[in-house]
Image: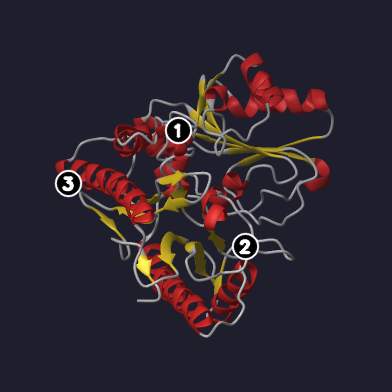
């Protein structure tokens, strides 16, 4: 059941007349999650659900799927033809003028821009002004419950442990001169997670050498690179507990298959670490001081360190992403590069900070998770300070 009264209170505080949810063929997972709908239910026809800032919600459903929103409170209107649909929309929206929808101006925030342009045009044709629901989504989908924070920490303990075990496993194979490929280590890690009831949308990223410089590298099923002495090894690892409502933990750590880390790798890691820490400190200090901050500002604090070091063109992605029930969640991203994320960072949300420098011959990334509570923010797990010399 959606938090109708809380949503209405937030609508009034944002000076909006209502929030219009819309779906067709499960295009909007945000709507299903906030409204508590079955994400696998039949949605072969368009439905609309309108929560006004004051008063009773309304729903508009097709007659052959008339029961699709029966779990939600409010009056129900039905339609069959498109003319009836248009009239029904006018009725459920009534005199509301400023309407929030899963819409992002110029698609600046693709995670929120889920309503098609034609539907936006239709709502505007009815004389309504469409606003982005981005900040509403943060409050009612991206913000964690206390139980979700507990699930994050529990998943984090497993993810961190398996990551460290993977470095040890790589070291053992190298010492014993036994063959081990990126793909084999990746599959071993995936099996460890499944045996401990941790799930994800894919197995970890395991990359050596130039592959560590590819932020979304996936070891191929055949022809995966061998892991050898002298290799720089990147592990990007994420997972959540296999239970309803749990949220992700997502980290990246670096290791070197040798007894001491070469200076060329240590130098780049030091720059990345400094950029990571600049972003962390900016968030922690700002939240502690009660200052409102936005995703793009965190990105700027991080990116400026790498720019001053002369590696700006090798930091090719945003500083971080929202984390929730999806590993890339629907809250504010730490982004001033790919988009200018103007969303404010709100309490009870979590995001990654993961700067990287990706050179042709190798790449380095360090990733932590930051949770923002009430008046305090924290990194939720161990923070890597040096590349691990795996054979030391």
The residue closer to the viewer here, 20 or 157, is: 157
Q: Earlier in the sequence, mark 2 or mark 3?
A: 2
Q: Earlier in the sequence, mark 3 or mark 1?
A: 3
- From the top left corner, tell me how far across and down residue 163 is, in percent: 45, 71
- Mark sitting on residue 337: none
Q: Is residue 151 above or below residue 315?
A: below
**Residue at x-position 64% and y-position 68%:** 183
Q: Is residue 132 above or below residue 69?
A: above
Q: Earlier in the sequence, mark 1 or mark 2?
A: 2
Residue, disc 1: 313
Give the CA distance from mark 1 to mark 2.
29 Å
**Residue at x-position 73% and y-position 65%:** 221
Circle nearer the viewer, 2 or 3: 2
Residue, disc 2: 202
Q: Which quadrant, please, contains the C terminus? A: bottom left
- From the top left corner, tell me how far across and down residue 344 is, in percent: 35, 35
Residue, disc 3: 288
Which residue lies most toward the bottom here? 176
| Dot 3 alpha-carbon crowd within 10 angstroms: few under 14, some 14 to 19, many 20 or more | some
| Dot 2 alpha-carbon crowd within 10 angstroms: few under 14, some 14 to 19, many 20 or more | few
Mark 1, secondary structure of its residue: helix
**Residue at x-position 48% and y-position 39%:** 317
Q: Quadrant of residue 225?
A: bottom right
């Amino acid at each position: 059941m959606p938090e109708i009264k809380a949503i209405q209170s937030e609508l009034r505080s944002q000076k909006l007349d209502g929030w219009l949810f819309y779906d067709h063929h499960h295009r909007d997972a945000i709507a299903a999650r906030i409204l508590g709908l079955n994400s696998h239910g039949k949605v072969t026809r368009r439905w609309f659900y309108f929560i006004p800032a004051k008063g009773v919600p309304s729903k508009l459903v097709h007659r052959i799927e008339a029961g699709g929103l029966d779990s939600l409170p409010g009056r129900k209107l039905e339609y069959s033809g498109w003319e009836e649909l248009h009239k029904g929309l006018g009725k459920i929206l009534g005199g509301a003028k400023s309407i929030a929808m899963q819409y992002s101006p110029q698609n600046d925030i693709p995670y929120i821009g889920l309503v098609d342009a034609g539907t936006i045009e239709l709502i505007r044709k009815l004389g309504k002004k469409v606003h982005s629901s981005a900040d509403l989504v943060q409050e009612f989908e991206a913000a964690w419950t206390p139980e979700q924070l507990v699930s994050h920490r529990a998943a984090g303990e497993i993810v961190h442990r398996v990551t460290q075990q993977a470095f040890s496993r790589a070291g053992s194979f190298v010492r014993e001169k036994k063959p081990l490929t990126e793909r084999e280590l990746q599959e071993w890690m995936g099996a460890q997670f499944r045996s401990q009831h941790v799930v994800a949308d894919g197995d970890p990223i395991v990359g050596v050498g130039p592959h560590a410089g590819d932020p979304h590298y996936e070891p191929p099923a055949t022809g995966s690179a061998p892991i050898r002495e002298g290799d720089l090894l990147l592990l990007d690892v994420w997972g959540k507990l296999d239970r309803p409502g749990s949220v992700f933990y997502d980290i990246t750590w670096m290791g070197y298959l040798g007894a001491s880390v070469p200076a060329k790798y240590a130098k780049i890691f030091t720059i990345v670490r400094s950029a990571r820490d600049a972003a962390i400190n900016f968030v922690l200090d700002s939240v502690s001081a009660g200052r409102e901050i936005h995703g793009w500002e965190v990105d700027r604090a991080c990116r400026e360190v790498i720019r001053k070091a002369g590696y700006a063109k090798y930091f090719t992605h945003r500083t971080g992403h929202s984390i929730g029930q999806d590993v890339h969640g629907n809250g504010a991203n730490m982004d001033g590069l790919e988009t200018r994320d103007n969303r404010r960072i709100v309490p009870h949300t979590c995001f990654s900070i993961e700067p990287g420098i990706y050179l042709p011959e190798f790449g380095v990334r360090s990733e932590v998770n930051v949770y923002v509570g009430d008046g305090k923010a924290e990194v939720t797990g161990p923070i890597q300070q040096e590349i691990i010399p795996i054979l030391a």
